Image (tube, coloured by chain):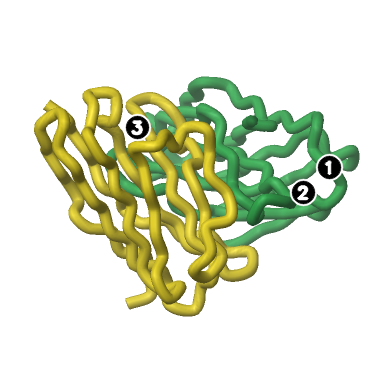
Amino acid sequence: DTGVSQNPRHKITKRGQNVTFRCDPISEHNRLYWYRQTLGQGPEFLTYFQNEAQLEKSRLLSDRFSAERPKGSFSTLEIQRTEQGDSAMYLCASNGGFGYTFGSGTRLTVV
Amino acid sequence: DAKTTQPPSMDCAEGRAANLPCNHSTISGNEYVYWYRQIHSQGPQYIIHGLKNNETNEMASLIITEDRKSSTLILPHATLRDTAVYYCIVRVERYGNKLVFGAGTILRVKS
């Protein structure tokens, strides 16, 4: 498999619950990015990893959000105490050199 | 943060060339221009990228003006499957070389 895989594809959760998303990047890519996309908008940068190190976090990433990339392989994005405003598509991308490959995203709906 | 300006929407007749413009007047000398497209509910798909010279691949051509302040993506023979949101992106050459998306152009190819 040469693509970026994201799971789950869809997640419906009740407000106040915690959710976790997973991203499996292209294996030889050392950079991994998380984006959030709301309806009618372009993807907004959230955070990025170089191998296992998280090197930048956007102001959009509140204290309720945390991301990890143990051992520089897959990454997880956790949202605690979800709010309705967290409803969005969460996209993961990996990069090795000039190429950036995006996954299909996880669509989160908070009810 | 987005450094690009694109028209919100464009129409194109099937079989004709689609020319999508993009302004990036504040681009720096070592920043690349990338084009991605996104079909509903999917992750962004890479089309092409360039620095100074015009580029062509099996999907499209990228024409960058000599002053690098604008570019045009050309889909030579648009099909209905090319209907999508097209993003012109300047890659920020720091902070992990992240891609900063704008709102994009909705291209509608009509039969």
Q: Which residue is mark 3?
A: B111
Q: Specify the farthest residue to the top.
A: B8
Q: Secondary structure at mark 2?
A: loop
Q: Quadrant of the C terminus of chain B?
A: top left
Q: Residues within 10 Å of mark 3 (few under 14, many from 20)?
A: few
Q: Is residue A41 above or below residue A36?
A: above
The residue shown at (43%, 49%) is A34
Q: Residues at badges 2 and 1 in contact (C-beta under 8 Å)?
A: yes
Which mark is in front, 3 or 1?
1
Q: Chain of mark 2?
A: B
In depth, the one of B25 and A56 nearer the eye is A56
Residue B49 picture location, percent across and down: 65, 54
N-term-proximal mark, 2 vs 3: 2
Residue B60 picture location, percent across and down: 58, 52
Report, in whole angstroms, how far the alpha carbon at label 2 lies from the one at label 1.
Answer: 5 Å
Report, in whole angstroms, how far the alpha carbon at label 3 lies from the one at label 1.
Answer: 39 Å
In depth, the one of B22 and B27 nearer the eye is B27
The residue shown at (61%, 35%) is B19
Q: Which residue is mark 1?
A: B28
Is residue B102 among the parts visible in the rendering? yes
The residue shown at (50%, 48%) is A47
Display colour for chain B: green
Label at residue B56:
none
The residue shown at (60%, 34%) is B20
- Write down the quadrant of residue B24 in the picture: top right
Residue type at mark 3 is Ser
Residue B94 picture location, percent across and down: 72, 51
Q: Secondary structure at mark 3?
A: loop
Q: Chain of mark 3?
A: B
Q: Which residue is mark 2?
A: B31
Report, in whole angstroms, how far the alpha carbon at label 2 lies from the one at label 3.
Answer: 37 Å
Count the labels in the image: 3
